[in-house]
Image (cartoon, helix red, strand yellow):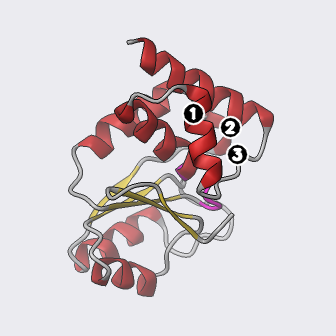
Amino acid sequence: MPDRIKVDDRFTIEVAPPSAERLAELAQEGFRSVVSLRTRGEANEILSPDREGEVARQHGLTFVNLPVSPQDISDAAADRFNEEVARLPGPVVVHCASGLRAGIFTFMHVARRQGWAGDEAVKKAEQLGFKFGTAEAKDFFKRYVDRGKAK
């Protein structure tokens, strides 16, 4: 998976959590919001969620931490993500530890907003270089996107 995936003009996925220096670069690049899906104390933590929020705000970025462990990916977590990111000023960068959670949640959000079907959303995500990791993750993704299309 690439280091960064630009999903559309509003959302970009970073596959690694940012350092303080990276947050400054994101602000300089024109991003206005940062969403972290990391939980407190995750392995290889560069900045705690609290510290990341402080540094992001120092650079004029809106910061939201929506902690979701890889085991807690669910409809409820995705619904919360959708509600939170809809309120954020864009462009928005979303990250987790490896890009998997960030990619799943961001692509699901964009797919529902665009009215894509699950299979179409999978194809578009994979064309941009996103890797789902497991068949279960891909199945969850497709089901969630398709349920949104049915609404």
Q: Residues within 10 Å of mark 1 (few under 14, many from 20)?
A: some
Q: Is residue 110 magenta?
A: no
Looking at this view, name the residue that lies furthest to the right. Answer: 135
**Is residue 100 in view?**
no
The image position of residue 141, as x and y in percent, is 60, 31
Looking at the image, tell me whether mark 2 or mark 1 is earlier in sequence order: 2
Disc 3, SS:
loop
Which residue matches tag 3? 132
Q: In this view, does 126 lie above or below 71?
A: below
Specify start and end residues of the magenta stretch as a single range. Answer: 97-102
Q: Label 2: state its secondary structure.
A: helix
59 sits to left or right of 136: left
Q: Distance between the residues labelled 2 and 3?
A: 14 Å
Label 1: element kind: helix
Q: Mark 1 points at which residue?
A: 120
For the image shown, how many numbered marks are present on the structure?
3
Q: Which amino acid does label 1 sit on?
A: Glu
Of labels 2 and 3, earlier in sequence is: 2
Q: Residue at x 46, y 30 (%)?
A: 116
Q: Which of marks 1 and 3 is in front?
A: 1
Task: Answer with left or right where residue 87 lies relative to residue 106.
Answer: left
Amino acid under label 2? Gln
**Which residue is pictured at 60% across the width and 35% down the height?**
73
Query: Disc 2 vs disc 1: which is toward the camera?
Result: 1
- Asked if 74 appears above or below 124 in the picture, the reply is above
- Decide if residue 92 is on the left or right side of residue 46: left
* First in sequence: mark 1 vs mark 3: 1
Residues under numbered marks 1 and 3 in contact, where contact means CB atoms less than 8 Å apart: no
The reply to whether the magenta stretch includes residue 98 is yes
Q: Which of 42 and 73 is in front in this view?
A: 73
- Quickly name the residue at label 2: 71
In which quadrant will I find the C terminus? Answer: top left
